[in-house]
Amino acid sequence: MIVELTESPLDVGEIARRVVPEECGATVTLDGYVRKFTKGRETEYLVYEAYEPMALKEMEKLVQAAKEKFEISHVAIVHRLGRLEIGETSVVIAVAAPHRRAAFEACEWLIKELKRTVPIWKKEVYADGEVWVEGEAKG
Amino acid sequence: MIVELTESPLDVGEIARRVVPEECGATVTLDGYVRKFTKGRETEYLVYEAYEPMALKEMEKLVQAAKEKFEISHVAIVHRLGRLEIGETSVVIAVAAPHRRAAFEACEWLIKELKRTVPIWKKEVYADGEVWVEGEAKG
Amino acid sequence: MTMIIKVLFFGATADEAGTAKAEIDLEDGIVAEAALTEILNRYPKLTASRERGSLLFAVNQEYVKGDELVRDGDELAVFTAVSGG
Amino acid sequence: MTMIIKVLFFGATADEAGTAKAEIDLEDGIVAEAALTEILNRYPKLTASRERGSLLFAVNQEYVKGDELVRDGDELAVFTAVSGG
């Protein structure tokens, strides 16, 4: 399992290629990046902040849960923190599995849960102001 | 749309980052690579062969169909040909979409259809022989 | 008897609390829910997030339900619904 | 009248045909299905793949149903079920 937080730019290919076990044939990767427009409003840049030790623990829990729920072999989750420009990658989730179906399902489940439970926050900065984005509450 | 066939090694990250439109926030990538063991038998390497002009046409058709079927913005499909060693990437499908759900769905649909319709064949080479793999027939 | 608890605020809650970090004294034997109420009393601007149902609360880097005992030296964290990814 | 058609074989069918490429003469006005039958007559080892339902057939780089007219200079391709990815 790879779970990391970093202020450095993420290399999606490098992360994806870290999870290539011999028994697998497919890795599904989600590359989440900074959108220029959100609801028609133009973002200048984003700032991500985390409660780092808790975020790492929650990411580990998610990987454990995904491994119980899906037939997957290896998972990497790396989330970037600090200031991100438009188009830069904020999160990479790569899942390797013997069969691709499980990799797709697990990857999609992991990003959904990460957005719900992992204590990381996003501030959107516009030309005329900034706002901390509030997620859906953890139910 | 990017559809390519190449004998050179594939860089999954480089391909994924070619499809990052400003209106999007997520790219889902399938990285298919050479498995060491298939049904317990150890593969030494693979050889991929294509009916190249038809394969490119079929890949273009798949991308067109995916764009009609799913809310996606940009697709790249690159398939490698020739001899591939264990762990090397044979195919990359990267799909960018405003919303990640569509990107996951389209990516999974594209790899399923590619395996059914695009005229590319795989020869598995073992220590004691080789065999052209026969896919599910195109229905 | 009182005890000293470390409280962390993140994102919007840090702005609302005017600080990212505080130490507060709480009565011994208090449960998490009561500790949160006490924190809200001291940082009343956080109440809006709580009323929206967006306020989350962790003790020692774990989400809590509310009935867990808070102990001397514990690390509490208060934050709005997460928005990473 | 006959016409000259280019035939391509790939993967297992190239091994079975003993060649990747051939030119064959077919009667004018023949449809794709009949052209395939003629090709199988000349390369009988391909029949096994056809009986398994694995043989696919394309004219000018498009899959065909079978009733399409084949024309002089067309490129036909014969191959087993694809296995890329």
Image (tube, coloured by chain):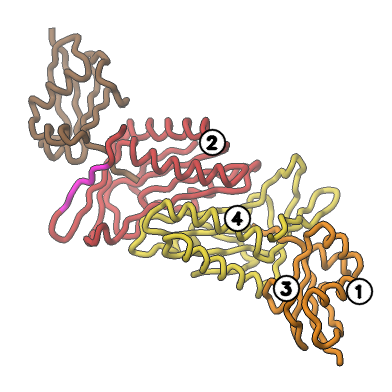
Chain colours: A yellow, B red, C orange, D brown
Mark 2 vs mark 3, foreground winner is: 3
Circle 2 Cα neighbour tier, 10 Å, few/some/many (<14 / 14–19 / ≥20)? some
* Badge 4 amino acid: Lys
Whether residue D77 sits left or right of residue A86 in the image: it is left
Q: Secondary structure at mark 1?
A: helix
The percent coordinates of residue A25 (x first, y second) are: 36, 56
Mark 1 lies on residue: C42
Q: Amino acid at mark 1?
A: Arg
The relative height of residue C73 versus residue A111 in the rendered view (above or below) is: below
User: In this rendering, do the residues under marks 2 and 3 share a single chain?
Assistant: no
Q: CB under 8 Å between callouts 1 and 2?
A: no
Q: Secondary structure at mark 4?
A: helix
State the residue position of label 4. A112
Q: Are marks 3 and 4 in contact (CB under 8 Å)?
A: no
State yes or no: discs 1 and 4 in contact (Cβ < 8 Å): no
Foreground: disc 2 or disc 4: 4
Left or right of residue B105: residue B41: left
Q: Residues within 10 Å of mark 4 (few under 14, many from 20)?
A: some
- Residue at (34, 41) in percent of width and height: B115
Find the magenta span and give its range.
B130-135
Per the rendering, the mark at residue B70 is 2
Q: Which residue is mark 3?
A: C58
